[in-house]
Image (cartoon, rainbow, N blue to C red):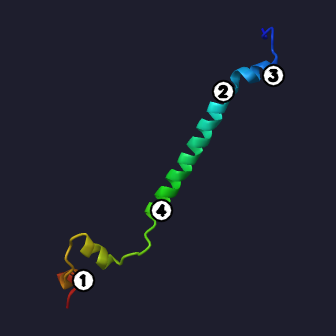
């Protein structure tokens, strides 16, 4: 069954606050999503890439010449 009184102008007036709230929530959610994407993209990019040796030094590992040399069974 359909509603006996389907005056759309009256319904628009009665629901305008709820519709405005829904539109506001959608806009705020979209802005937060965009802000989160921008934040994570900026955090993922490193403006000064390091070499592997510099990364090991910053990680607290010491670089020795032994690690750069070939394994003992391959040395001549």
Sooner in the amino-acid sequence: mark 1 or mark 4: 4
Q: Name above or below for residue 1 compared with residue 45.
A: above
Q: CA distance from mark 4 to mark 2?
A: 37 Å
Q: Is residue 16 left or right of residue 71?
A: right
Sooner in the amino-acid sequence: mark 4 or mark 2: 2
Q: CA distance from mark 1 to mark 3?
A: 80 Å
Q: Which mark is residue 27?
A: none
Q: CA distance from mark 2 to mark 1?
A: 70 Å
Q: Residue at x 47, y 57 (%)?
A: 40
Pinpoint residue 75: horizontal percent, then vertical percent.
20, 87
Q: Secondary structure at mark 3?
A: helix
**Image-quadrant location for residue 30:** top right
Foreground tag (4 vs 3): 3
Q: Quadrant of the N terminus?
A: top right
Residue indicated by mark 1: 68
Q: Name above or below for residue 55 compared with residue 75.
A: above
Sooner in the amino-acid sequence: mark 3 or mark 2: 3
Frontmost residue, 60 versus 28 = 28
Foreground tag (1 vs 3): 3
Q: Which mark is residue 17?
A: 2
Residue indicated by mark 3: 9
Q: Residue at x 20, y 91 (%)?
A: 76
Q: Secondary structure at mark 4?
A: helix
């Amino acid at each position: 069954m359909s509603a006996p009184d389907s005056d759309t102008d009256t319904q628009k007036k009665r629901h305008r606050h709820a519709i405005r709230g829904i539109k506001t929530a959608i806009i705020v959610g979209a802005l937060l999503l965009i802000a989160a994407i921008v934040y994570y993209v900026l955090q993922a990019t490193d403006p000064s890439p390091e070499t592997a040796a510099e990364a090991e030094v910053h990680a607290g590992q010491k670089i020795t010449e032994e690690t750069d040399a070939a394994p003992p069974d391959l040395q001549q």
